[in-house]
Image (cartoon, rainbow, N blue to C red):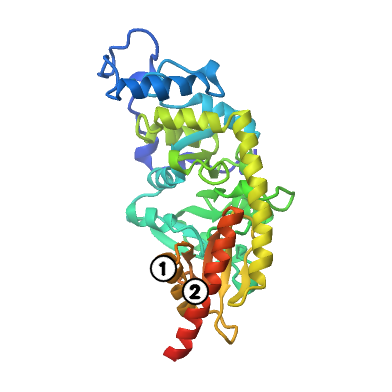
Amino acid sequence: MKRTDFNLQQAVRPNIWALKPYRCARDDYSTGILLDANENSYGSSLPLNLITTHLQPSLKTHPLQDSITYTDSNLNRYPDPYQQDIKQQLCKLRNISSPDCFFLGVGSDESIDLAFRVFCTPGKEKCLITPPTYGMYSVSAQTNDVGVVKVPLVLEEGKFQLRVDDMLEELDNDPSIKLTFICSPGNPTGTLIAKRDIKRILDHENYKGIVIVDEAYIDFSEDSDDYGSVATWVEEYPNLIVIQTLSKAFGMAGIRLGIAVSSPEIAGLFNKTKAPYNISTPTSLLARAALSEPGIAAMQSYKSQILAERGKLISTLSNTTGIGCILGGNNANFLLAQVVDLDATPSNFIAHAVYKMMAEELGVVVRFRGSEIGCEGCLRITVGTEEENKVMLEKFVQAYAKCSADSVGSN
């Protein structure tokens, strides 16, 4: 164990540390004649034909049919509050030794929000973020009345790596910083953060708070000694939380399942602070199917196609009129493409006009990111299917021709 000096109790809000969790009915029993939770014993209000033609047949063909429980097949019953089956699957997938290291939430955003609620005293304490980065860190901070300290990434040449010395200086000078967010691969940067830099933050003994590494896009990157996932580090670092999701590589954005990996102690704090039944039965069933062997095989197949298309997009966009640089490390399922004017200067005016025209007139939606630091003139473009990418490129060329000409006229 590293950071043996770290004291979790001192990092946690005293009221949360002392919290006695709500004990729900399914904490005790989930089989038998269940008259303990004020559920509707007559069944759900779904039309009978929907149950017999869709729900029951789907359960019979579920990849993990042998593990289907009574509450899985009876939607009038509350679900498993801790979803141990999913956690066991994640142990195998992520090479984590114990299911006690996992918290499951409604998307990654629930884990982010819980981190603020567990560790940060409203109106007094702060978090540190490294822009350009995922916007929900700041939104959750503001929602929870937590201050935000910003240390921008290295912006030169679109490197988007941590400025570790500057971060450590902030952490040394401001002991009220309780959470440090690191997005790897970054959003909108698409760049993996060097493991050695993450390690320096984790090892810094003057910092008594928590490091949160957001790995929503980690499955689109290659793991190596220098870059990649640090999820297994939670078994060495008691001050680390790694956030992942099924929304990206697994293609399960619609079920809203997020994952936090940490020490069992932190996962326990999250589990006692969350709402009693935060993961629904349909979400659980679909997640278990996605994490089965056939589900993982499908994910790997789709990922291979996405990476191949990503490579083709990088090549094509780099030679497309109106595109300057492709910024960042391209370690996710999107690209950060810089739109330039006729003098090859990054242009927010043209980029925003192109974005609006593509969405409102040409039926292709990308995302304007030019308002973020280090992203002047940038569009974030998700890697689509081969046909979608072909259409996107055609529509970009069309929109750029008009919008760049209009910009000359407006000057």
**Residue that appears at 60% across and 83% down:** 344
**Residue that appears at 62% across and 35% down:** 296
Percent across and percent down for residue 252 are 50, 40
Rendered view: 345 above or below 17: below
Rendered view: 148 above or below 202: below
SS category of the residue bearing label 2: helix
**Residue that appears at 58% across and 43% down:** 5
Task: Using the image as rendered, state which of residue 382 and residue 164 is in the foreground.
Answer: 382
Task: Using the image as rendered, state which of residue 182 and residue 327 is in the foreground.
Answer: 327
Which residue does the numbered mark 2 point to in the structure image?
A: 399
- Asked if the residues shown at circle 2 and circle 1 are in contact, with their CB atoms under 8 angstroms apart, the answer is yes
Q: For the C terminus, which image quadrant?
A: bottom left
**Residue that appears at 44% across and 55% down:** 137
Percent across and percent down for residue 55 are 41, 23
**Is residue 78 in sight in this rendering?**
no
- Left/right placement of residue 98 relative to residue 258 reads right
Q: For the N terminus, which image quadrant?
A: top right
All told, the count of numbered labels is 2
> Which amino acid, mark 2?
Ala
Percent across and percent down for residue 318 are 66, 71
Rendered view: 13 above or below 409: above
Picture disc at residue 361: 1
Q: Characterize the local packing of mark 2: few (<14), some (14-19) or many (20 or more) Cα atoms within 10 angstroms.
A: many
SS category of the residue bearing label 1: loop
Percent across and percent down for residue 272 are 39, 32
